Image (cartoon, rainbow, N blue to C red):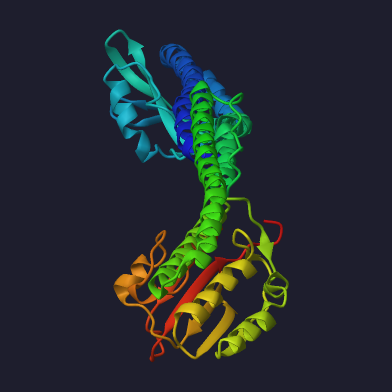
Amino acid sequence: MTRRLILLALPLLLTLMAAIGIPWATAIAERHSTALANDRIADATRFAMATLHSLTADNGVRLERELDDYAELFGSPVWVVDREREVLHAHGGGALPAGASGTIDAALAGQLPQVGGVLWPWGPDAVYVAAPVGIDSQVTAALVIEVPTTRVKDAVLEGWLRAAVVLAAAMTAAVWILWPLSRWVLKPIRTLAAAADRVAVGELGARARGDAGPPELRALAGTFNRMAHSVQDTFRRQEQFVHDASHQLRTPLTAVRLAVENLEPELTTDDGREIQREAVQELDRMGALVESMLAATQAGPVATGAVDTSAGLGGREELWAAAAAARGFGFSAAIEPASGVAEPTGGLAQVLDELVENALRLSGGTRVGVTGRSGRGDYVIEVADDGRGLSPAEAAQATGRFWRSPAHQNIPGTGLGLQIVEQSVRDVGGSLELESPPAGGGTGLVARIRLPRRAPGA
């Protein structure tokens, strides 16, 4: 998040640097161009006046010497041309450059000398300055100076380099400041996300810090904390209600059951004794339901860890095989050892105990198998039987509270087992799937649990 925030800010910083850098670069080029133009225009004007005096006084011998000295000193060839463009003087005898034609025309027309525009580093290697020679509008000749621009372009590039270093330093400082600033802004979001994750895995007492970051994020943290407190309080009251209700029902149920059992010596008819037995069985079912409700109160979200499948089962395969044999079932187990498997609430063994018990008690089949294997990022455990299975509609309802299949109405049970299993698995990010008939064909039911794998230290 911090990196994304900085990446979002970088275009704004670059735009700001461009808004500063482009005018700055232009100002540097204009400053050096103006300085060169002023120097060369002053020189051209002075030599033009000297040329006028020389042409009328000493036939230009002295002037030619000064112009040659100037050309050698500054590396700027100088020409003097008359109105017919005949060269009156040329340093080193060089021909009049073609690029100076427009400048000469302007000078002969009486225009003051000038250097056109800003000299950019990619511009020409030389420009020309021409000054009219004459009095008022009587122009008799033009003095032309070739002005090399290499030094000016180098000076402009050097100025740009210095400006770039300054802007790069400013950009680096801005990013350096933005990093801790963004972390300060995002710190409440990170603590809020951490608190939300802890609440999601059952630490209902987790709270976000609301004393850091911008006021809006502190207010958000306060809102989250109030919500978490409300959820914790609601969950605690609901759990306490179910727990208290279940405990309160135990005593009267036990008393009623004893009273009904004590009626047996007083019953003289077979019908009466049958009704008494049915009443005891119904009270036993109600007692089992109360115990299941107590177990369901422990199936709420709690913090969980990772488990090794071999250690987590604790030798349960032998117990399952014995239970299957006692009911006349064949049994097989092939559980691949794996570490870092998310452990459901109450433990992996308890969850599988419920699924194996359901298969032995309710399937009506002859075989039960338990398999476990590593999948793509998860661990898959299947408890399969070859019994009557469930219809698609029944499979969709099987994990609901107190749901019983019509085929199992006369078999002891509360209808809470699968619901508790699904909740326990879902608490750690897993899932419970009921598939009937199995994908490989045949009859029966496959209860498939998918548990995520956790990295070491997670």
Q: Nearer the viewer, residue 137 or 93?
A: 137
Q: Nearer the viewer, residue 148 or 173?
A: 173
Seen in the picture, residue 400 relative to 336 is either above or below; the reply is above
Q: Residue at x 56, y 86 (%)?
A: 327
Q: Nearer the viewer, residue 120 or 259?
A: 259
Find residue 45 and report its horizontal and vertical position in percent: 44, 15
Q: Image check: 450 left or right of 334?
A: left
Q: Image check: 8 left or right of 302?
A: left
Q: Quadrant of the N terminus?
A: top right
Q: Image check: 457 left or right of 290?
A: right
Residue 310 seen by the camera:
yes
Find residue 446 and report its horizontal and vertical position in percent: 45, 80
Q: Residue at x 50, y 75 (%)?
A: 358
Residue 174 seen by the camera:
no
Hey, which quadrant is residue 120 in on the image?
top left
Find residue 251 and report its horizontal and vertical position in percent: 57, 49
Hey, which quadrant is residue 104 in on the image?
top left
Seen in the picture, residue 24 relative to 304 is either above or below; the reply is above
The tally of labels here is 0
Q: Nearer the viewer, residue 110 or 61?
A: 110
Q: Residue at x 69, y 69 (%)?
A: 312
Find residue 405 and report its horizontal and vertical position in percent: 36, 72
Q: Quadrant of the C terminus?
A: bottom right
